């Protein structure tokens, strides 16, 4: 009985996992494949990628040509069927009305969370990224090193399927042999970017995305994933056989009903359910972790969103994986005589060191790419290639005015046209109509490129979240209030991005579209808007200055774990989700081991 309701849910489980996205999916998968009885509580609705994914629908079939609207900001067909920048009846508060203090919060409310439509860019953090303080004296080190996480990166890549290549570049780790799938072919525009960037000394290498460029190796990988566990190997071998390779034609943000890319709903949950060890309760909004007299977590309380009723369920272990800020909110709302400032908050650090990714973009038009013959260039829907940070040595030698690096995501080509595809050509044509307009569209379509920087933010004391004393959501649960500030390091980094992207566009013989910003405050995207928010319950080696130990286990409550981005002690330029999954697998292994030893 995998999907349960109030009627058939058991009263107690080995482990409760709150949230079903990357963190919750990975936690539940690892635990269930090793025999733990798990209840997953998910605030959003049930969602079936097989039947609900509009893979092949064309824009003309949708209202407003499938263009974005306030309730579907990524377009009508986007996979997010619940949640977004605004969640009706579930507000949050910004402490500052100024742009500089702005924090935007994207929340999914559906089974699988944001993994149904995320960009699938899956980069490993490198050795430097775990020890940033040691390297430059800013921020804080993680209590673990790259070597501690490397075996788990290998496992996650093998399980979910990530394409890419091993290039041996500085702080850009190689995967173990056989972990990566071959990368897809680059677009014509990618090849031009690579050629011209190289002339500037900027390396362009194959991207890493969680997309199957070929079927998974269901004969060899199961034994590497679950050594000594024949049952788990059988389940995952069968599941891998049922995942098809990419057909290179449909936008991944709508989801993938053939299971060729990673979504928690298509990769983690099916085998976990097949193990018979997972119960899932959707529409369950958790608001509190409850404590027993012994000071240990004994379960969680939640609101059933369909009935509005409050319920409680018990477990030996509680794992919060509701996304960084939601997990922090649950901790801060779980007050008791023992923890008047919120659960596991004896350090006062819950909510602190909130981080996002530095983002800045420049687009350009490239005459060399005009009037190309029609090509089937739908490709992998993003990141065939990318630029890893390449200035580690210059930065370490003090030659740059900011402390941490960024990688470059870029794109071009001829995607499926929408209503806006031929709009805004006047800056090139001076304005045209009729037959001339059609000629112009044919000439310019496919000649545009864009570059986006994704950079490291250093944690600071001014960027944090707390419970707002007045505002509650429609369930009566107090909401978060955000405080946000970029430092000069991030602002200068954003300007460096603008200059670099402009240089590459010029090296391609092109021209930039719109102003190139030299003011960091204008160059940088608002806090939270890159949707890589992490921190808020950081891991460390000292209970006085961190919330969890190196196993994602809270210092204060032995059987309470956090496996989402809340535990990140820094936020490297690499997109966070692969690291979230690797940490979640490692934490779940630790839980299993301690349960076996009867310590939990
Ligand atoms: C458009 C977009 C593109 C992205 N692209 C990339 C990318 O290319 N690479 C990358 O690394 N990252 C990317 N990300 C970020 C990535 O999606 C997140 O890092 C990742 O999903 C985080 O996993 P999570 O499990 O912590 O949170 P989520 O995936 O958000 O899952 C959390 C789940 O918990 C549920 N939940 C929340 N509160 C509660 C509660 N109180 N009770 C019960 N359940 C609750 C939510 O409904 C949700 O289903 C992108 C995100 C977006 C939106
Ligand atoms: S491009 Fe490939 S991975 Fe993406 S949705 Fe289409 S088939 Fe799936």
Image (cartoon, rainbow, N blue to C red):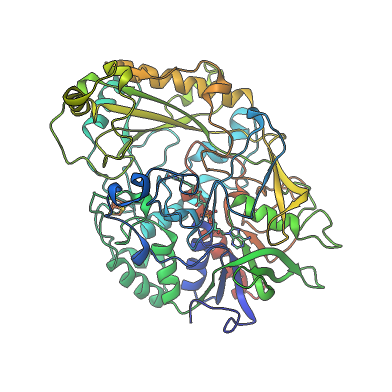
Q: Is residue 216 above or below residue 452?
A: below
430, 372: nearer the viewer: 430
Quadrant housing the C terminus? bottom right
- Residue at 71% across, 64% down: 288
Residue 116 in sight from this viewpoint: yes
Residue 93, quarter of picture: top right
Residue furthest out toward the front: 434
- Residue at 52% across, 62% down: 20
Residue furthest out toward the left: 373
Badge count: 0
Point out residue 454 in the picture as x, y percentages from the top left corner.
Answer: 47, 33
222, 356: nearer the viewer: 356
Left or right of 300, for residue 521: left
70, 296: nearer the viewer: 70
Residue 510 in sight from this viewpoint: no
Residue 5, quarter of picture: bottom right
Point out residue 275 in the picture as x, y percentages from the top left corner.
Answer: 44, 77
Residue 291, quarter of picture: bottom right
Residue furthest out toward the right: 337
- Residue at 48% across, 20% down: 496
420, 28: nearer the viewer: 420
Point out residue 368 in the picture as x, y percentages from the top left corner.
Answer: 20, 21
Q: Is residue 212 above or below residue 354?
A: below
């Amino acid at each position: 009985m995998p999907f349960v309701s109030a009627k058939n849910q058991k009263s107690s489980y080995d482990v409760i996992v709150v949230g079903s996205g990357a963190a919750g999916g990975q936690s539940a998968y690892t635990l269930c494949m090793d025999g733990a009885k798990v209840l997953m509580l998910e605030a959003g609705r049930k969602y079936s990628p097989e039947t609900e994914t509009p893979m092949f629908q064309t824009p003309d079939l949708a209202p407003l040509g499938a263009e974005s609207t306030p309730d579907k900001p990524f377009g009508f067909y986007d996979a997010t069927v619940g949640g977004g920048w605004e969640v009706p009846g579930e507000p949050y508060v910004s402490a500052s009305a100024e742009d500089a203090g702005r924090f935007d919060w994207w929340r999914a409310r559906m089974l699988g969370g944001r993994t149904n439509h995320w960009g699938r860019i899956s980069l490993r953090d490198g050795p430097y990224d775990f020890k940033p303080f040691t390297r430059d004296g800013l921020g804080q080190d993680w209590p673990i090193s790259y070597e501690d996480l490397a075996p788990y990166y290998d496992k996650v890549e093998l399980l979910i399927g990530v394409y890419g290549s091993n290039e041996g570049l500085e702080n850009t780790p190689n995967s173990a042999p056989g972990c990566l799938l071959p990368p897809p072919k680059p677009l014509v525009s990618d090849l031009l970017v690579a050629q011209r960037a190289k002339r500037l000394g900027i390396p362009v290498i194959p991207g890493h995305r969680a997309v199957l460029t070929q079927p998974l190796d269901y004969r060899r990988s199961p034994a590497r994933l679950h050594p000594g566990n024949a049952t788990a190997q059988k389940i995952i071998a069968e599941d891998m056989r049922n995942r098809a390779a990419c057909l290179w034609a449909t936008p991944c943000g709508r989801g993938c009903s053939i299971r060729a890319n990673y979504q928690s709903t298509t990769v983690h949950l099916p085998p976990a359910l097949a193990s018979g060890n997972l119960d899932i309760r959707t529409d369950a909004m958790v608001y509190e972790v409850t404590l027993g007299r012994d000071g240990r977590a004994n379960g969680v309380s939640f609101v059933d969103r369909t009935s509005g009723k409050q319920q409680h369920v018990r477990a030996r272990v509680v794992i919060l994986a509701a996304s960084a800020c939601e997990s922090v909110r649950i901790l801060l709302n779980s007050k008791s005589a023992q923890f008047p400032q919120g659960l596991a908050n004896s350090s006062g650090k819950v909510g602190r060191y909130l981080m996002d990714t530095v983002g800045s973009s420049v687009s350009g038009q490239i005459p060399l790419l005009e009037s190309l013959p029609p090509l089937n260039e739908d490709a992998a829907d993003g990141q065939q290639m990318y630029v890893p940070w390449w200035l580690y040595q210059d930065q370490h030698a003090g030659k740059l005015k900011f402390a941490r690096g960024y990688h470059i995501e870029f794109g071009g080509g001829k995607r499926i046209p929408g209503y806006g595809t031929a709009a805004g050509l006047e800056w090139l044509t001076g304005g045209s109509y009729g037959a001339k307009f059609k000629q112009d569209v044919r000439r310019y379509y496919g000649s545009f490129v864009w570059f986006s920087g994704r950079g490291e933010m250093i944690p600071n004391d001014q960027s944090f979240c707390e419970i707002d004393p007045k505002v509650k959501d429609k369930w009566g649960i107090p909401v978060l209030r955000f405080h946000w500030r970029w430092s000069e390091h991030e602002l200068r980094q954003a300007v460096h991005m603008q200059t670099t992207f402009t240089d590459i566009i010029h090296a391609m013989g092109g021209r930039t579209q719109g102003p190139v910003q030299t003011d960091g405050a204008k160059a940088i995207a608002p806090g939270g808007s890159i949707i890589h928010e992490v921190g808020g319950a950081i891991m460390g080696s000292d209970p006085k200055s961190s919330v969890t130990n190196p196993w994602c286990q809270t210092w204060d409550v032995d059987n309470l774990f956090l496996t989402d981005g809340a535990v990140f002690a820094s936020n490297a330029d690499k997109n966070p989700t692969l690291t979230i999954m690797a940490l979640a697998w490692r934490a779940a292994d630790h839980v299993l081991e301690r349960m076996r030893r009867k310590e939990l």
